[in-house]
């Protein structure tokens, strides 16, 4: 009987010691790792939100022009609305640049994608701060942001895998053209449709 009690006591003591050891060594590391993974996903979500904000605002600005014959009151309200969309782009590009260290580090550094994304963020902000007219800014921002959306946020993983090379090349060409200081700020007609068809 005493041997059974001794066995049970030994097993209980071993279980307690093991639980204590895991709680003191393994659990904190797992909790810290869980927090880092959660933070990385939150940063990616914020990155995605910024990209979608830029694309949506660009689409609205390109699709909506203020008619010349609108009453002054309505014209003022519509210009304020366009300015609100421009402010959204301004805030989104600010976030991309100010938080590069947060979101860029969550992505795979192979294939040069991380460096390409950092370059995109800097150039997108540069477009906003440039002296280009509004239409040129919006067009260039759309042109360099669409490939980013395709590379990282296409609906299915296999679609991203199939198109990552072509979209990365598309983005690289657009950034090269932007950084070269070409005077033809507007993308070449058909560029968007051709790139999406690849």
Image (spheres, grey):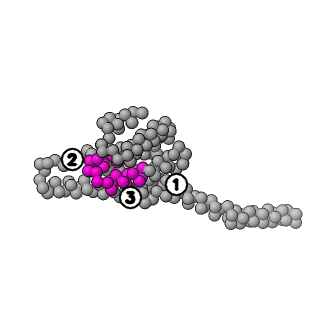
Residue under numbered circle 2: 65
Residue 94's tag is 3
- Location of residue 44 in the rendering, given as x and y in whole percent from the top left corner: 47, 53
Q: Secondary structure at mark 1?
A: helix
Choose the circle earlier in sequence order: 2 or 3: 2
Residue 41 drawn above or below residue 20: above
Q: Quadrant of residue 16?
A: bottom right
- At numbered mark 3, what does the secondary structure look like: helix, strand or loop? helix
Residue under the point 50% across and 46% down: 113
Occupied quadrant, residue 72: bottom left
Decide whether the magenta segment is chiefly helix, strand or loop.
helix
Crowdedness near tag 3: few (<14), some (14–19) or many (≥20) residues, C-alpha within 10 Å: some
Give the camera-side residue of 91 and 170. 170
Judge left or right: residue 23 versus residue 174: right
Residue behind mark 1:
105
Q: Which mark is residue 88?
A: none
| Residue 53: image location, x then y, percent | 36, 52
N-terminal-most mark, 1 or 3: 3
Asked if the magenta segment contains residue 114, the reply would be no
State which tag comes first along the sequence, 1 or 2: 2
Q: Which quadrant of the view contains residue 194?
A: top left
Q: Secondary structure at mark 2?
A: loop
């Amino acid at each position: 009987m005493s041997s059974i009690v001794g066995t049970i006591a030994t097993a209980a003591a071993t279980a307690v010691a093991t639980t204590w050891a895991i709680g003191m060594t393994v659990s904190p590391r797992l909790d810290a790792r869980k927090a880092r993974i959660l933070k990385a996903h939150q940063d990616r979500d914020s990155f995605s939100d910024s990209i979608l904000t830029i694309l949506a605002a660009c689409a609205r600005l390109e699709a909506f022009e203020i008619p010349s014959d609108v009453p002054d009151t309505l014209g003022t309200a519509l210009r304020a609305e366009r300015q609100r969309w421009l402010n959204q782009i301004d805030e989104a590009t600010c976030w991309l640049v100010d938080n590069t260290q947060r979101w860029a580090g969550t992505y795979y550094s192979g294939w040069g994608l991380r460096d390409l994304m950092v370059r995109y963020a800097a150039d997108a902000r540069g477009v906003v701060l440039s002296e280009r007219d509004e239409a040129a800014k919006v067009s260039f921002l759309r042109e360099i942001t669409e490939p980013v959306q395709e590379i990282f946020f296409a609906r299915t993983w296999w679609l991203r895998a199939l198109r990552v090379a072509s979209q990365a090349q598309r983005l690289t060409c657009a950034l090269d053209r932007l950084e070269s200081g070409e005077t033809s700020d507007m993308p070449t007609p058909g560029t968007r449709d051709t790139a999406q068809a690849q």
